[in-house]
Image (tube, rainbow, N blue to C red):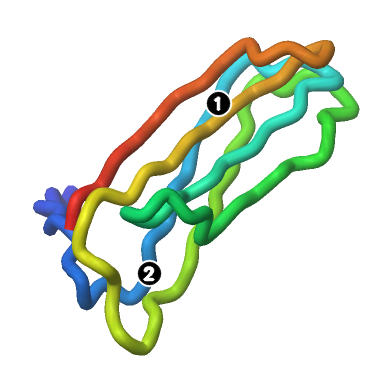
Amino acid sequence: MEARAWKKPSASAAAIVAFVRVIGLKAGDAQRLVIEDPTGKAIAENRAAQLESNKAQFMLFTGRKRPATGWERGTYKATYVVERDGRMVLERKLELTL
């Protein structure tokens, strides 16, 4: 078995990717995962189709390759939302500062 030490991403990272592993979703749930740059502009988004059946587990991800100029320094924010019957039932926020 091998243990790895994760390095904090830098402005030269090849991509910024956010992902979630969710358990217990219901048929009809709608999900979205959005990454915003330090200015609040959405740079990546994944809006999954409404689920056709209950899901014991589900993974959702979104991301963007590094721009030619590198990543802008500051805090990048990812927001994951689940809506059920038109109401938000789950929201989680993640942050990464470069």
Give 68 or 22, whichever is nearer the viewer.
68
Say left or right for 64 vs 73: right
Q: Is residue 34 above or below residue 55?
A: below
Q: Which residue is mark 2?
A: 15
Q: Residues within 10 Å of mark 1 (few under 14, many from 20)?
A: few
- Disc 1 versus disc 2: nearer the observer: 2
Q: Residue 75: where, in percent of width, then height? A: 25, 49
What residue sits 55% from the left and 58% below the top?
A: 44
The image quadrant that residue 7 belongs to is bottom left
Say left or right for 59 vs 98: right
Which mark sits nearer the N-terminus, 1 or 2?
Answer: 2
Q: Is residue 69 above or below residue 63?
A: below
What residue sits 38% from the left and 69% below the top?
A: 15
The alpha-carbon separation of the residues under discs 1 and 2 comes to 23 Å
Say left or right for 3 vs 51: left
Q: Is residue 74 above or below residue 79?
A: below
Give the secondary structure at mark 1. strand
Q: Which mark is residue 79?
A: none
Dot 1 amino acid type: Val
Question: Quadrant of the image for the C terminus?
Answer: bottom left
Q: Residue 78: where, in percent of width, then height? A: 43, 42
In the image as oriented, which residue stretches furthest toward the bottom?
68
Q: Residue 22: where, in percent of width, then height? A: 55, 26
Q: Residues within 10 Å of mark 2 (few under 14, many from 20)?
A: some
What residue sits 73% from the left and 12% below the top?
A: 87
Give the secondary structure at mark 2. strand
Q: Which mark is residue 22?
A: 1
